[in-house]
Every structure is written in structure tokens, then in C-alpha cells.
Image (cartoon, rainbow, N blue to C red):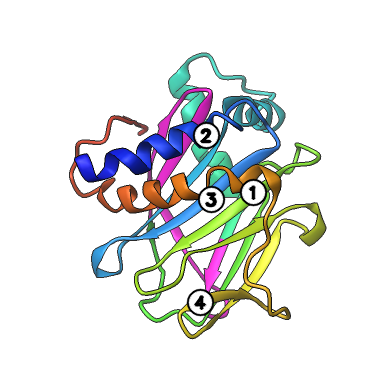
Amino acid sequence: MKKYMLPLVAFWFSIASFAHNPDVSTIMLVEKENNVWVLQISASLTAFQHEVRTHFDETPYKSPEEFQKMVLEHIKNNLEISFNNNREITLGQGIVKLGHETNVVFEVSGIPSEINSVWVENNVFKDISRNQSALFLFKEGFTKEQFVLDNANGHTLALEVRGNKFVVVGTSKASFFSPYFGLFFIGLLGIGFLLHNVFGNKKVALKTVR
């Protein structure tokens, strides 16, 4: 566990810069062993509350458990990720950890072992006018790249594999950096590796949502 302490400290230090900012979120796809993947979405609690109140205004939540279920449903309805020409992923079991900086983690199926292209459309926070999301893909043997989904690209990205890198289709530049995201890139690397064990060790201190 000691080997994870430094990345975790870096992560939480950097998270402090955006935990209360509803405009900023992160999406991480992390490959575990044997082509098993997990997805984590992190954003301020305020951002999730705004979206839930907007989309579930006719059935307002009455408990944290109801809120968590609505968060999971909202993400499944508004995040699309596909590989290799429209091979869509499936989001399985989801867990939510509520806090100023709220994390949602899903088991993921449907990602091919050999990846040629990736397409992402993120409308999870579409009702927050200037929202932007950092996208991180952690695949073994690949360089770690950062991409941003925002109003400029319609919160949509098309990526292709070139060697051991993911690059944006139609441009030679592999990453786009926002001032918000530079601070916690190092921390996210650490969390990315830590997520390799999220569903494997059964000791995650997150609340399971059924």
C-alpha cells in the first residue's frame, strides 16, 4: 500500500483546486489485467446535483441512496464511448462515493483487446454552460495522454491509435491542456494505477448502489 501513498497525496492535493468547481470533471478509462476495464468519472458534488435536479425534477430524490441511483442512471444515459467503429461499451455495476469531489466508478465490458479507434461523446454535464472534461485513457503499453472535451469540440472526440499512442483524428497534436487540468495530471496517473485494484480486491471504501 505504501507505493500508492505518494500518488494519492499528489491526487488529493491537486483535487483541492477543482473539488468545488462545477465546470470541471474528469473521465478515466483504466485497463486492469486480462482486458478488464473500469471507468471513473469525477466531478464536484454541485455538478452532479445540478444535473440530477434538472433531469429528475418530477421525481426529486429523498435520500442519498436515491440520489446515487439517479447519478448512475444519468451517466448511463448521457455518456457514449465506442471502440473500433461503433463497438459500444457496456457500463455494468456502478459505485458512488459522495463528497465535495464525488467519484463514480463502473465496471466496463465490450472493449476489444486490440484497439484501433475510440469515439467519446460526453453529455453528462451538458446543462452546465462552460463545462469541460479531461479524458484519460490508461492502457498497458500505451503512453498516457490527456484530452479535453468542451464546447469547442461539442464534447465529442474521435481518437485513433498510432503506434502506442491515442491521437485526435485529423490533427497531429495528441493532447489539449486546460489550466484546470494541469495541476492534477500527476495525481490522476497515481489514481489510474490504483483503480487497477478497485473491483479486484473487494476492499474499496465506496458505497455500492443496487
Q: Quick one: label 1, few (<14), some, or many (20+) residues within 10 Å?
A: many
For numbered disc 4, what is the local secondary structure? Answer: strand
The amino acid type found where label 4 is placed reads Lys
Question: Residue 182, relative to residue 128: is it above or below?
Answer: below
Residue interval drawn in magenta: 81-107
Q: Quick one: label 3, few (<14), some, or many (20+) residues within 10 Å?
A: many
Camera-nearest residue between 173 and 39: 173
Q: Could you tell me if the residues under marks 4 and 3 are in contact, i.e. CB atoms within 8 Å?
A: no
List the residue tagged with mark 1. Answer: 133
Camera-nearest residue between 21 and 103: 21
Locate residue 154: give its quadrant: bottom right
| Real-space Cα separation, disc 3 to disc 1, in angstroms | 7 Å
Going from N to C along the chain, the mark reached first, 4 or 1, is 1
Q: Could you tell me if the residues under marks 2 and 4 are in contact, i.e. CB atoms within 8 Å?
A: no
Disc nearest the viewer among 4 and 3: 4
List the residue tagged with mark 3. Answer: 27
Q: Position of residue 92 (x, y in %)?
A: 38, 51
The amino acid type found where label 2 is placed reads Ile
List the residue tagged with mark 2. Answer: 15
Image-based side of 86 in relation to 151, left or right: left
